Amino acid sequence: MKKLKFEQMCKRACKLAKTLKSRKDVLIVTHVDADGITSGAIACQSLINAGIECKVVFIKQLDEGAIEKVADTGKFVWFTDLGSGQIDLIEKHGVECIITDHHVPLRRVGYQLNPHDFGVDGSCEFGGATSTYLVARYMNRANRNLSSLAVVGCVGDLQDFRSGKLLSYNRLILKDGVKEGVLEITRDIRLFGKQTRPVYKMLEFTFDPFLPGLSGSEEGSIKFMTSLSVPPKEGELWRRWIDLKRNEKIRITSALVKLLMKYCYPLSSIERLVGEVYILKEQPEGTELKDAMEFSTLLNATARYGYEDVGLDVCLGVCKSISSSRFEKALKRARVLLQNHRRNLSEGIKLVDEIGITELENIQYFHAGNAIMDTIVGIVAGMYFSKANLEKPIIAFANTDDGVKVSGRATQRLVELGVDLSEVMRIAAEKVGGKGGGHCIAAGATIPKGSEEKFLKEVDRIVGLQIRS
Ligand code: C5P
Ligand code: C5P
Ligand code: ZN
């Protein structure tokens, strides 16, 4: 069955690759997050390799205004990591295009590669970058080395979150990368910052899962290490995870497992602590680019703040298709943005601690007002599951220029119980004159200011229905 579906998807990818190759000039329109940037970079690099002119533009929300602008260019468009939810608008404005996306599509069309059209889950089996990569792969065999960027995109989209590794079709592209010699799969602790941060900082800044006594505490994290006879420093230098000896890593990992067991964490979140880690073999040791998880966060740190071009340059630099000075400059800028991003996330978590989370019958919510940016409120909401009730989806609000941004996050367990936030956001937003969509487990919307209460009521009602049915 799976093989058959893959064959069908490859056939579609092959057809779309042919369409692209018949063009001289293509406009790539992509999404402002890690898998949007990697998708854009994969598309761009494969067109460059084919000698086709191209340009990448980033779009936060593909609404009618944005599509009109795209249509006005008169160019052939490659939509990546978005577009499937806007097929009607794309057709209404007569945009000639192909789409490689993984969001729930409005309907089936022959010019898109979307896993849902083939009965495949777009939130854990097949990401937006996977979709884009598959087309690139059929444009030219040499594009297989772009699989490392596709894996970074998948990880950025949390496709590996549930099982601690990439599954299904995402795994097939991972294997491409291993075969090409650009990726390596290792088993390790799945915390952020193994390559670049001192171990105590890595622990201190882990909020997902929340590590009692360590998360948010520098002193607690350092004490934890010394109590396990793992010196935090070597000479004057703070040791990173990659600097530790194997038995030191094991001591820390098992102590973390014990800690979470002591605090009665669900088995699933304890199991997720260790899993697969994807290494970009050609990148220098000790940099953000070496580890797919760190790489994707670096990209999110650019995109979520309106500096997608910086992230794109980092990806193109990795493909060696821009000058090394431009690459270095982008990397330096991205690192500054990353520090800013980390600060914002930890301040976001603290803010939710302060304002608290309100539980309704079937959901829980917080309203960040102007205190958390609309572009990261969803990340904060997802991270907050480490502290909040795991039995109810989290709905988060943040003000934007054109209304109120909503981000919804569920857990895998809730999805298994029937929760589909993509449907919830779409229906509830429409009810109050807004627009929404996304995935079962993570979705978002924009609604008019002042409609939050009515919206919440509707969300609470629909989630209740989904769980009961
Ligand atoms: O638009 P896009 O699909 O790329 O955005 C997906 C977002 O959903 C990611 O930023 C990620 O935070 C979230 N997500 C999640 N859990 C998943 C899959 C995605 O929270 N299993
Ligand atoms: O912004 P956030 O990370 O919460 O988005 C979660 C998911 O919901 C993403 O896949 C995004 O593309 C989708 N979304 C949407 N319509 C919106 C806002 C978000 O489809 N208005
Ligand atoms: Zn995506």
Image (cartoon, rainbow, N blue to C red):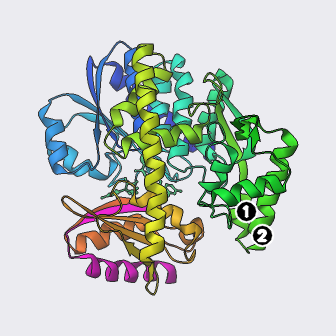
The verdict on residue 444 being magenta is: yes
Question: Can you say whether 12 is above or below 388 in the image?
Answer: above
Which numbered disc, 1 or 2, marks the residue that appears first in the sequence? 2
Compared across the picture, whether 457 is left or right of 356 comes to left
Q: Residue at (51%, 40%) from the top-left corner?
A: 296
The residue to which callout 1 is attached is 270
> Label 2 amino acid?
Met
Q: Position of residue 47 (x, y in %)?
A: 37, 20
The reply, left or right, for residue 466 in relation to residue 291 is left
Q: Using the image as rendered, state which of residue 264 and residue 111 is in the foreground.
A: 264
**Is any part of residue 53 visible from this angle?**
yes
Q: Which residues are magenta?
A: 440-468
Residue at which label 2 appears: 261
Q: Nearer the viewer, mark 1 or mark 2?
A: 2
Identify the residue at image location x=53%, y=37%.
Answer: 295
Label 1 Cα neighbours within 10 Å, binned few <14 / some 14-19 / many ≥20: some
